[in-house]
């Protein structure tokens, strides 16, 4: 699975919102696991709602950042552990709730099956799993400038080449959870707003530039894009960012399921 630093940076700014859909299923006496917690922003927000929140991530630098957040937060019911979510270092039936945010969609079928089997193993009977992931089919972009359409097309070419299942992952969460033995009890979708004001628009352009510049050499080396297309896509985002009425809302699908 790739570690997308631009997504982690983005989530760092928006901890609580990302888990709002899961909050009605949580209670103050629960033990919660946030799997693939990244910098721990969402874990910390959830620690304010449950009894104990534990975040795990496979990346040591994510755990360093999360530990720093824990020590400055003043929260005493928050812990982070460096671990692989496909082989969790916890006993059976340890947690009341397991949460995955922007984590599952890049996994191949075998890793997804292992991860969800582990989530099931560590959940108590009756425990809940919450998942939230992207679905490009629901994104809203305006104005659809040629260069920005090209940029989205370049990302799509990459995902179709690298991981075609990831593009519309969000809408498939309920069926994926059901196929692995959970009982889905709630589904929804929301938007992440990349265009609330001039600051968030310029952050969106910076994120898009970082992502395109990171992906560009791989797209070109695999014959999926030309240097000219990368430059046109970058110029497209710059033009989009200069429009004070430009909007970009990215779809996130949400699912809650129970371990019966
Ligand atoms: C896009 S980030 C999302 C971070 C966080 N959930 C959020 O939304 O802010 C995906 C995270 O999953 C972690 N990850 C990927 N594979 C993992 C694995 N096998 N076990 C644990 N963490 C993993 C990555 O290191 C990364 O921090």
Image (cartoon, rainbow, N blue to C red):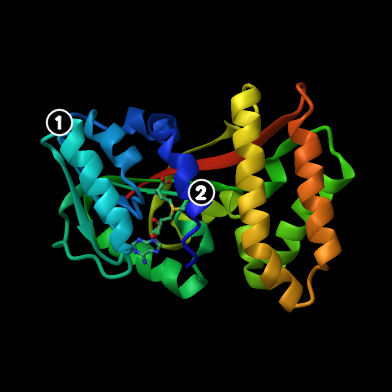
Q: In the image, is 18 to the left or to the right of 128?
A: right
Q: Is mark 1 within 8 Å of ligand 1?
A: no
Does residue 227 appear in this view?
A: yes
The relative height of residue 8 versus residue 105 in the rendered view (above or below) is above
* 214 to the left or right of 178: right
Front position in the image: 74 or 89: 74
Which residue corresponds to the image point at 31% horizontal and 44% vertical from the top-left?
40
Q: Examine the image and state in which quarter residue 243 appears.
A: top right
Where residue 46 appears, x then y in whole percent? Answer: 28, 34
Side (left or right) of 43 relative to 147: left
Note whether residue 168 is visible: no
Quadrant location, ligand no. 1: bottom left
Residue 92 on image: x %, y %: 16, 61
Q: Residue furthest right?
A: 146
**Badge 2: residue crowd in 10 Å (few <14, some 14–19, many ≥20):** few
Q: How many badges with numbers are in the image? A: 2
**Secondary structure category for the residue under label 1:** loop
- The earlier-in-sequence mark between 2 and 1 is 2
Residue assigned mark 2: 7
Secondary element type, mark 2 = helix
Q: Report the front residue among 92 and 211.
A: 211
Is residue 152 shown above or below 206? below
Q: Residue at x 15, y 53 (%)?
A: 94
Q: Which circle marks residue 74 in the picture?
A: 1
| Residue beneath the point at 71% across and 46% down | 137
* Mark 1 residue crowding within 10 angstroms, few (<14) / some (14–19) / many (20+): few
Q: Is mark 2 within 8 Å of ligand 1?
A: yes
């Amino acid at each position: 699975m790739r570690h997308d630093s631009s997504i982690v940076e983005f989530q760092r700014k928006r901890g609580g919102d990302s888990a709002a859909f899961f909050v009605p299923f949580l209670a103050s006496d629960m033990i919660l696991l946030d799997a693939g917690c990244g910098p721990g922003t969402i874990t910390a927000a959830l620690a304010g709602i449950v009894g104990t929140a534990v975040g795990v991530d496979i990346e040591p630098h994510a755990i360093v950042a999360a530990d720093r957040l824990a020590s400055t937060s003043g929260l005493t019911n928050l812990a982070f552990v460096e671990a692989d979510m496909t082989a969790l270092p916890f006993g059976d039936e340890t947690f009341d709730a397991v949460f995955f945010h922007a984590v599952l969609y890049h996994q191949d079928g075998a890793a997804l099956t292992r991860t969800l089997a582990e989530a099931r193993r560590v959940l108590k009977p009756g425990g809940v799993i919450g998942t939230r992931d992207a679905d490009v089919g629901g994104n809203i972009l305006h104005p659809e400038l040629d260069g920005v359409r090209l940029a989205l097309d370049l990302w799509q070419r990459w995902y179709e080449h690298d991981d075609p299942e990831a593009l519309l992952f969000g809408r498939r969460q309920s069926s994926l959870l059901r196929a692995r033995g959970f009982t889905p009890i709630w589904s929804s979708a929301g938007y992440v707003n990349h265009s609330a004001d001039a600051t968030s628009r310029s952050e969106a352009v910076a994120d898009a530039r970082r992502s395109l510049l990171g992906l560009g050499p791989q797209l070109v080396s695999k014959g999926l894009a030309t240097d000219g297309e990368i430059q046109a896509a970058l110029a497209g985002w710059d033009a989009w960012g200069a429009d004070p009425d430009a909007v970009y809302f990215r779809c996130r699908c949400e699912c809650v399921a129970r371990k019966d």
